[in-house]
Image (spheres, rainbow, N blue to C red):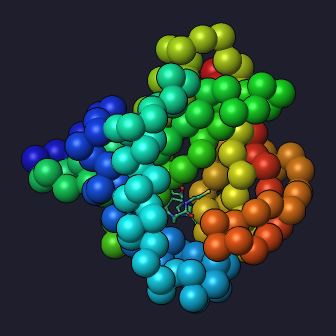
Amino acid sequence: MPLEIRPATARDANAIADLHVASWRSAYRGMFSDTYLDGDITRERRQHWTKRLRTEPRSDQGVFVAVEDGACVGFICILLELDPEWGPCLDNLHVQPNRKGQGIGQRLIEAGAAWVKSRGTYHRWHLWVLEENTPSRRVYEHLGWKPQERAIRRAPDGTTYWGWRYLQALK
Ligand SMILES: CC(C)(COP(=O)(O)OP(=O)(O)OC[C@H]1O[C@@H](n2cnc3c(N)ncnc32)[C@H](O)[C@@H]1OP(=O)(O)O)[C@@H](O)C(=O)NCCC(=O)NCCS
């Protein structure tokens, strides 16, 4: 079956959580602590995505999954009203580690941008990325996102890190 991008449903919560964990463990090693990454983050992520998709969904939230042969190989989450000054926020974007570099991330970003534009008059959206996450920063810059500011951010493992805010115009 060809790859399909579709809105996530509550039934996707565990698959998204498991992909989130696999992606963090693969891409964020050395950025988040080993203790955190090797701990029981699957349970925490499953609770997080169950809350977001099933028990307490936000009305301004858009979550899309990339599905192939019934398996979730990527997801994107956008929060429209998180930061009124900077516009909608691309809050999460992850592709299955062994499927990176095959155009899935770009398709998810395009689906996310189309959804944002369908929800109101938004001229730009933004995201935060870890300063040390060079591969992802290169992808964003390649796709036309522009770095705006550097700030200290709180990581899920409780530590702080330097992050960059990127902005992309919505055409
Ligand atoms: C960042 C991520 C979502 C990108 O998804 P992806 O499917 O790997 O990216 P794509 O294959 O769609 O690539 C998008 C574009 O970036 C380019 N690209 C990919 N890797 C690149 C790199 N390291 N440097 C420069 N350009 C790159 C691709 O060539 C493509 O451009 P093209 O269509 O002109 O060829 C994915 O790599 C990922 O899950 N990373 C780990 C999690 C993460 O860090 N997420 C971001 C959190 S802020």
**In the picture provided, is 34 more to the left or to the right than 75?**
right
Q: Residue at x 51, y 52 (%)?
A: 93
Q: Residue at x 64, y 78 (%)?
A: 32
Count of marks, rendered view: 0
User: Nearest the camera: 30 or 146?
Assistant: 30
Query: Relative to 77, is 92 above or below?
Result: below
Query: Relative to 26, is 71 above or below?
Result: above
User: Nearest the camera: 106 or 65?
Assistant: 65
Expressed as whole percent of the image width and height from the top left, the position of residue 168 reads 70, 36
Residue 94 visible here: yes
Expressed as whole percent of the image width and height from the top left, the position of residue 1 reads 10, 47
Expressed as whole percent of the image width and height from the top left, the position of residue 151 reads 88, 58
Residue 101 visible here: no
Q: Quadrant of the C terminus?
A: top right
User: Nearest the camera: 76 or 106?
Assistant: 76
Expressed as whole percent of the image width and height from the top left, the position of residue 12 reads 27, 46
Q: Residue at x 23, y 43 (%)?
A: 11
Q: Residue at x 50, y 14 (%)?
A: 118
Query: Relative to 118, is 49 above or below?
Result: below
Q: Residue furthest front?
A: 55
**In the picture provided, is 169 more to the left or to the right than 24?**
right
